[in-house]
Image (spheres, helix red, strand yellow):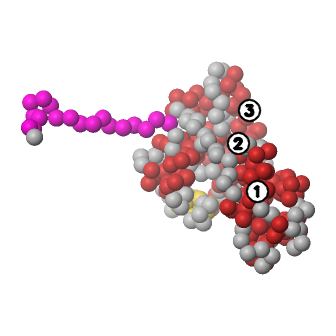
Amino acid sequence: MRTLGEAMDVYLSSSRFRRLAARTQRDYQKAILRLRGAFGHLPPAAWRPAAGYAYLETQQGSVQANRDLSVLANVMQVCVRSGVVERNLVREVEKNREQARERYVTDAELAAFLIHCNPKLTAWIGLKMLTGLRQGQMRALRVSDWRDDALWGPKAKGGRTLVFHGPGLAEAVDEVLRTHHGEQFRSVYLLCTRQGNQYTADGFRAIWQRAMRKHVDAGGQRFTEHDLRAKVASDSESLHLAQARMGHQTPNTTSRVYRRGPQVVTVLSRPEEGNKQEV
């Protein structure tokens, strides 16, 4: 690998890249197109952190620039494993500071939005609000994942399989089956299109945006489908339960990104005047 451009080609053909989700692969491919223009001509050993900082400065505060450097770090790791360089200097670059999204969807907002949703989207949201699964995980659910009164979700990013059970889950799944399948199973996918196909990211986005436009036209405030995942984490009884539902390996991401809205705190309990103890 004489240049980083060649290293990028090796990374794109690697098993590590092929194991990524389809949408992630597309995002990484777009990032690599941008990275080729900036660094593709450089020998891996010639890359220095100063080049990374210069890249960040051209898009100061940009989340995209941060993501691009994360992809470049994956590419540089290919060079490390091949012995082309000894250290992955990309990982030593301090990235642009990112402001965590703070949008919290209230119960009243969600109820107002549901008025504009068709029955299939309403059923989707009903299941989403119990599990907090990512959109991609929701789209990947299969009918066979519902067994023994438990929903076996796709593996979380940490590699752990989430198994959901509890009050209301059976009713939510029944509603999904009724609205998405009818009287007989039309697909292996739990949530499926009218033709029985798996929802694509673009296809679901179109359905969501149609309902959201009606919600906004009626005076509501816009929010994303991913904000509902954050609502599940925020409404969880504790950080520990929120972390479990999100499938995170540590509570840091759960607390920093997904626990939104006001934190309810009990006031300090003070003794009554007559019960004060003298010191």
In percent of width and height, residue 150 lies at 52, 59
Tell me the amino acid under the disc marked 3.
Arg
Magenta stretch: dominant secondary structure:
loop
Mark 3 to mark 2: distance in Å?
Answer: 31 Å
Decide whether residue 274 is among the magenta residues.
yes
Marks 2 and 1, how far apart in space? 17 Å
Above or below for 256 versus 51? above
Residue 274, position as x, y percentages in the image:
9, 30
Q: Quadrant of the N terminus?
A: bottom right
Report x, y in % for residue 215. Answer: 66, 26
Residue 163's place in the image compared with 224, above or below, is: below
Earlier residue among tags 3 and 2: 2
x 39%, y 37%: residue = 264
Please tell me which residue lies in front, 222 or 189: 222
Pick whichever of labels 1 and 3 is earlier in the sequence: 1
Quadrant location of residue 77?
Answer: bottom right
Q: Residue at x 50, y 49 (%)?
A: 255
Magenta span of residues: 261-278
Give me the residue at 57% from left, 37% from top.
102
- Determine if the magenta segment contains residue 149: no
Query: Pointer 2: what residue?
Result: 61
Image point (85%, 65%), residue name: 4
The residue tagged 3 is 210
Q: Residue at label 1? A: 50
How many marks are shown on the rendered structure?
3
Asked which secondary structure carries label 1, the reply is helix
Closer to the camera: disc 2 or disc 1?
1
- Amino acid, disc 2: Gly
Q: Can residue 92 be seen in this view?
A: yes
